[in-house]
Amino acid sequence: MKVLVVDPDPESRDALRRAFGANGNQARCVASAGEGTRRLPEFLPDVVIAAVDLPGGTAETFIAAAARDARRAVWALVPSDRLDLAVHAMERGAVDFLWRPVSVRRLSLLLDRFRRRRAAEERGEEDRLRLARVESLVALPGRSPRWTETMALIERLASESAVLITGEEGTEKEAAARFLHRLSPRGSGTLVKVAEGESFQDALSRAAGGTLFVTGIDRVPARVQAEILSSLDADVRPGLVLAADGDPADAVRRGKLAGGILRRLEDRVLHLPPLRERGEDVARLARHFLEETSATLSFDVEAMDALTAHDWPGNVQELREAVKRAAKLAEGPTIGPTVVRSVLGRPLSARGSRRRRVPTVRIAVGDSLADVERRLIQKTLEFARGNKRKTAELLKLSLKTIYNKIKEYGLEH
């Protein structure tokens, strides 16, 4: 455990240093609020003991600053005849107090109480994170390689204080923001979205202890972007999740986005891939959305082929709405291709095909036949957007052979 003692009395400081050191804790002792303030961000103490008689009347401000971290315990160090000062310090954020000179018995009691509270909090945090991971897999389903990488990145970026989400419209940026928040150290707080007409500063205050979600940052006024930039530089603030609908680098070039925002977050960018790049996830998501709509309906093979052949310019949101409409139009327990084509408006197999570039596979002398075959099947699967029947047709192989090769080469998670 790390303890920061801020006390102008040298004998008292030494006594506290010895008491904490004897129990194997790390103790740092300083004499002023200024020194204590400098030590807070670099030492990151679990416990702060602050004397109420710090020079220049700085105790109140320091105790309030130290108490901003809800996981930290702040104890006031009070002269033995001044209970009023102990009460005043607790009103400013201290959770308990010690009389000066310090009683070893009282100190041991507070330490034991703190350790038990911290252990309970850690158990609760583990349970909360476990539940959040399960919820994220249900709300953001998919097992394609691209989506598996994306979910792993959400987990890694959740510990950051600010993240930039990019992706086309309909790629579930708000849902991703929700789970960045839920998996973060601030996840027990609230995710706040800036309301229409609300000032950024008001929203920032509302999100205290949680995370603020700002969508369409490439469309907000320059004044608000300047406030966001200033907030990114602040030491103490809620978590920030910013979302841009377009390419942020292009938005900076066109003067739509402050370059400083992108520079500060360029190593903390979560890009959500479009649905057309997620292969078999189209079929998985379609079945998932249909189960949410009806427990009895299913897609036949041709209907599913039609869905996987579509470009999905509206991404996951478009697929969700298409499945809902198809369920309403269905007659009988099975949804066929006619219903799907009716929902999407025109024959699907040709949509967007003229715009797509056929991928190539590079082969070099020395490459094994197995490696060439694996890469060829992988590229064809990507071109067919995960449609195995289409992949088999393009490679002039049987559907059974394609399934066997996918399993052999581990091309699907």
Image: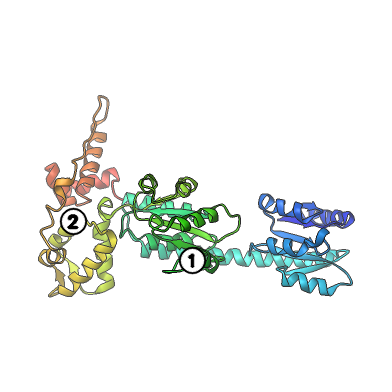
Q: What residue type is labelled 1?
A: Ser
Give the mark nearer the N terminus: 1 vs 2.
1
Marks 1,2: beta carbons within 8 A = no
Image coordinates of residue 296 in percent, x first then y, are 21, 74
Mark 1 lies on residue: 199
Q: What residue type is labelled 2?
A: His
In this view of the protein, can residue 133 be seen by the observer? no
Query: Whole-Å distance between the Cαs marked 1 and 2?
Result: 40 Å
Using the image, tell me which numbered label, if any, was put on residue 310: 2
Q: Residues within 10 Å of mark 1 (few under 14, many from 20)?
A: few
Vertical relation: 236 (above or below) 145: below
Image coordinates of residue 294 in percent, x first then y, are 24, 74
Q: How crowded is mark 2: few (under 14 residues within 10 Å), some or many (20 or more)?
A: many
Vertical relation: 109 (above or below) 381: below
Question: In the picture, which quadrant includes the N terminus?
Answer: bottom right
Q: In this view, does 344 lie to the left or right of 107?
A: left
Q: Which colour scheme is used?
A: rainbow
**Quadrant hosting residue 301:** bottom left
In this view of the protein, can residue 10 be seen by the observer? yes
**Quadrant hosting residue 394:** top left
Taking the spot 48% from the left edge, 47% from the top edge, the residue there is 260
Image coordinates of residue 160 in percent, x first then y, are 52, 53
